[in-house]
Amino acid sequence: MANPINVSAGNEAVLVLADSAANANIDAGATTGLVVPYMQDVTINNSTGVFRWKTLDNTAENAVTTPSTNQLTLNVVVDSDSFFGDGLGGDSVKDAGIFGSSKAKTKVFFEVGFEGRDSGSKILKGSGYISGLAPTVNMDAPVWVTPVTIEVDGDYTEDTAS
Amino acid sequence: MAIRDDLKANLDVALAGSSVSVSSELPWTSAGEPLYIKNMKKVYLDEDNINKTELFSTLDNQDVVQTETSVTGYLAVDAKTQPTDIDTIVSNVLNSRLAITNQAVSECDMSTSTEADVLVYQFQFNFITV
């Protein structure tokens, strides 16, 4: 039976960032990592490269896929604590914020919840580097918004929240 | 405090000593005739009209909402013999939009219409805040 994942409840699409895989725990009740607030959208890119070749005995090209380029891209409304850090110590990503982690080129670990944080919910894990920040504001929309890219180092890991 | 109240407080000061005054009443209609027609040379301000719309919709439902508030003001004068200081009065009413602080947009459009020998100035104030 088809089971589309509907995120309109507001607690389904979740992104947690942290300075270690353990701290990036998305499970309900876990508070160590930075739960990115005010996400307008999030896109998980898993784009393979393709190598193609032709042979004399074939009328069509052959192809194999090559290693993926993995990226997380999102747009967020800038929240002071999450962007500049809460400055409370603890997890360095939460402490320094998205901007601080990008500036310091800190490796961040992430967990993306597709169905929220409850036990059994589908998640993707990985690690990478924050890039592509470009906060912008204007008087027609006088609230800062910024794109964020996480250039994923390596592969995603599929898991479920526990 | 309603924006109408702030506008009225500002207009009370800005129009003091001019040919017109500011009424605290709403521009309701009496016997088929709006008060601002019945009582010329008085500025009437209608109630706030408020519209809340989503500026940014977010996945965690902490949507960023903007509030648009509009207020309509009316001033009727004798079309044949307008007050000598009408230009200053109109300018002061238009500028009263600046008295409403913390707004991303503060606009006031003025239009006129003539009913018999009465010239009606209508001021449409629009404010947007987030």
Image: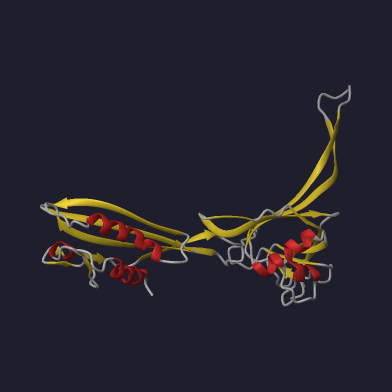
> Furthest-right residue in view?
A56
| Residue B58 lies in quadrant | bottom right
From the viewer's perspective, tell me whether residue B51 is left or right of residue A24.
left
User: How many marks can you see?
Assistant: 0
Image coords of residue A21 (percent x, y): 84, 67
Whether residue A81 is situated above or below residue A106 in the rendered picture: below
| Residue A62 lies in quadrant | top right
- Looking at the rendering, in which quadrant would you find the N terminus of chain A? bottom right
Residue A42 in view here:
no
* Nearer-the-camera pick, A81 or A162: A81
Residue A61 in view here:
yes
Whether residue B30 is situated above or below residue A30 in the rendered picture: above
* Nearer-the-camera pick, B31 or B128: B128
* Nearer-the-camera pick, A70 or B127: B127
Residue at (78%, 71%) from the top-left corner? A25
| Residue A120 lies in quadrant | bottom right
Residue at (70%, 70%) from the top-left corner? A117
- Please say which color scheme the image uses: secondary structure
Residue at (17%, 66%) from the top-left corner? B35
> Furthest-top residue in view?
A56
Image coords of residue A92 (percent x, y): 80, 70
From the viewer's perspective, tell me whether residue B67 is left or right of residue A95.
left
From the viewer's perspective, tell me whether residue B114 is left or right of residue A21.
left
Image coords of residue A35 (percent x, y): 70, 68
- Looking at the rendering, in which quadrant would you find the C terminus of chain A? bottom right
Image coords of residue A123 (percent x, y): 75, 63
Whether residue A48 is situated above or below residue B9 in the rendered picture: above
